[in-house]
Amino acid sequence: MIMNKGGLHIYSKKFETAEGRIDENVLSGFMDTIQMMLEKITNIMDITVFNREGVSVIISPRNIITGLIFSIEELNSLKILLKIFMDKLEKIYNNILRE
């Protein structure tokens, strides 16, 4: 999932279907709130991982967008790939995303 700094859902891709999924707009707003709280508490904009009941959430904040991966296990490769992807995405679409 990709969202802007205001929590607006920009893009998501599901690789597995599940029943009872939460609306992406609600989820991105909720995750944005969590990310803002973490930034205020720690003053660090770095990858954060939450693990709960068999689900890992990897959050990669950037200057104007934030990327999230929901997975069944926490893999270092996912963290690295998400960071690289978000850096490239923000660099390529910097002018468009700021608007």
Image (cartoon, helix red, strand yellow):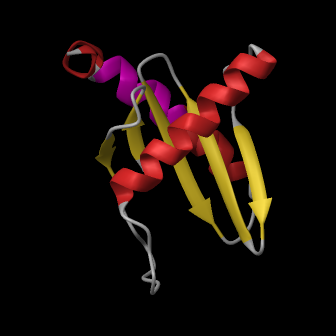
Looking at the image, residue 2 lies above or below residue 56: above
Give the percent coordinates (x, y) of residue 71: 62, 66
Residue 46 visible: no
Where residue 53 sits, quadrant-wise, is bottom right
Q: Is residue 45 above or below residue 9?
A: above
Q: Position of residue 43 (x, y in %)?
A: 74, 13
Residue at x-position 44% and y-position 47%: 28
In the shown orientation, is residue 72 left or right of residue 5?
right
Q: Is 26 on the left-hand or right-hand side of 30?
A: left
Give above or below for 17 relative to 11.
Answer: below
As drawn, the residue found furthest toward the bottom would be 19
Q: Could you tell me which residue is drawn at 20 percent across and 16 percent down? A: 99
Which residue is drawn at the image coordinates 69% and 51% (left, top)?
77
Which residue range is magenta in the image? 84-92
Closest to the observer: 56 or 31? 31
Instruction: Look at the image and say whether residue 49 sits in the magenta stretch.
Output: no
The picture places residue 45, in percent across and down from the top left corner, at 66, 20
Q: x and y percent of residue 19 in the render?
A: 45, 87
Instruction: Give the left or right position of residue 55, taking residue 64 as reference.
Output: right
| In the rendered image, the vertical position of residue 67 relative to residue 5, given as above or below | below
How many marks can you see? Answer: 0
Dominant SS of magenta comes to helix
